[in-house]
């Protein structure tokens, strides 16, 4: 069964550094998302991406964050000037229909630890 | 914005018994309600979903019910097995972003 893959599984970074989290969505999917889960808290929406542009973003997704689809398969989340509070699990998801309320399929996440 | 509450936070059942997890949502415009199962070290896996134009949906041992008037929806797992042990998340959506509940840790005791 096709799946969303994320790399790395665990990233440890010094505060203030930049990190790039990578995702390969399911190949025929058109909508891409990033969510995050701080330990013990809810999974929170960050951003959705369609047709090479951001379609929706949350208050969390400020100028510190950016997303990119550099080629036909990868979807990346860049976090600049990382802070301790950026430590969380980051999940990528994708859906196959260009519309709302379609099933979103998640990757296994990247655990980001900021020291 | 939408707010989703999920109960209970932990649930232990004997193997073979049923498990019920309940969620409430605040935005009456929400029209899509998926349930995810998350095993240790894995991402959320979609197990069943329901849209607001139906009241119940079933898939083998799993069923979901939706009460739009009361703004709550529930996950029912029958004949539970040890491999059902995981964290279960409900979510609600009025559009693209999913708003998640805080999760229920289900333990099925053999």
Image (cartoon, helix red, strand yellow):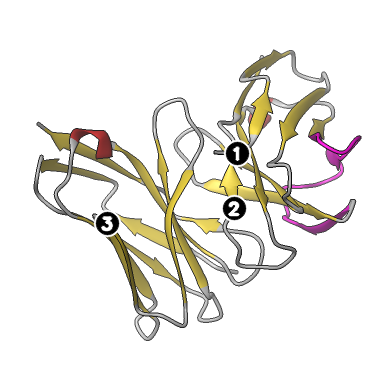
Residue A49 lies, with reference to residue A26, above or below; the image says below
User: Does residue B21 show up?
Assistant: no
Cα–Cα gap, marks 1 and 3: 22 Å
Q: Secondary structure at mark 1?
A: loop
| Residue bounds of the magenta highlight | A53-75
Circle nearer the viewer, 1 or 2: 1
Q: Chain of mark 3?
A: B
Cα–Cα gap, marks 2 and 3: 21 Å
Query: For the point 61% across and 20% down, which residue is it?
Result: A9
Residue extending furthest front? A1
Circles 1 and 3 on the same subunit: no
State the mark number for residue A104: 2
Q: Residues within 10 Å of mark 3 (few under 14, many from 20)?
A: few
State the mark number for residue B60: 3
Cα–Cα gap, marks 1 and 2: 13 Å
Foreground residue among B66 and A64: B66
In percent of width and height, residue A30 lies at 76, 53
Q: Is residue A64 left or right of residue B81?
A: right
Residue B56 lies, with reference to residue A26, above or below; the image says below
Name the quarter where the C terminus of chain A is drawn.
top right
| Picture quadrant of residue B61 | bottom left
């Amino acid at each position: 069964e096709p799946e969303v893959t994320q790399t790395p599984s665990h990233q440890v970074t010094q505060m203030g550094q930049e990190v790039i989290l990578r995702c390969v969505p399911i190949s025929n999917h058109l909508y891409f998302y990033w969510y995050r889960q701080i330990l013990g808290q809810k999974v929170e929406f960050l951003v959705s991406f369609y047709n090479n542009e951001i379609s929706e973003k949350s208050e969390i997704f400020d100028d510190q964050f950016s997303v990119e689809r550099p080629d036909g398969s990868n979807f990346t989340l860049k976090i600049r000037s990382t802070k301790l509070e950026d430590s969380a699990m980051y999940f990528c998801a994708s859906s196959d229909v260009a519309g709302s309320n379609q099933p979103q399929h998640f990757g296994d996440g990247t655990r980001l630890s900021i020291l | 914005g939408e707010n989703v509450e999920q109960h209970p936070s932990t649930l232990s059942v004997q193997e073979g018994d049923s498990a019920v997890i309940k969620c409430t949502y605040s935005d009456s415009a929400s029209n899509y309600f998926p349930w995810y199962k998350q095993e240790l070290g894995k991402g959320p896996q979609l197990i069943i979903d329901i849209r607001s134009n139906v009241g119940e949906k079933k898939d083998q041992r799993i069923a979901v019910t939706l009460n739009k008037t009361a703004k709550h929806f529930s996950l029912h797992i029958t004949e539970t097995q040890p491999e059902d042990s995981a964290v279960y998340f409900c979510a609600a959506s009025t559009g693209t972003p999913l708003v998640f509940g805080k999760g229920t840790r289900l333990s099925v005791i053999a």
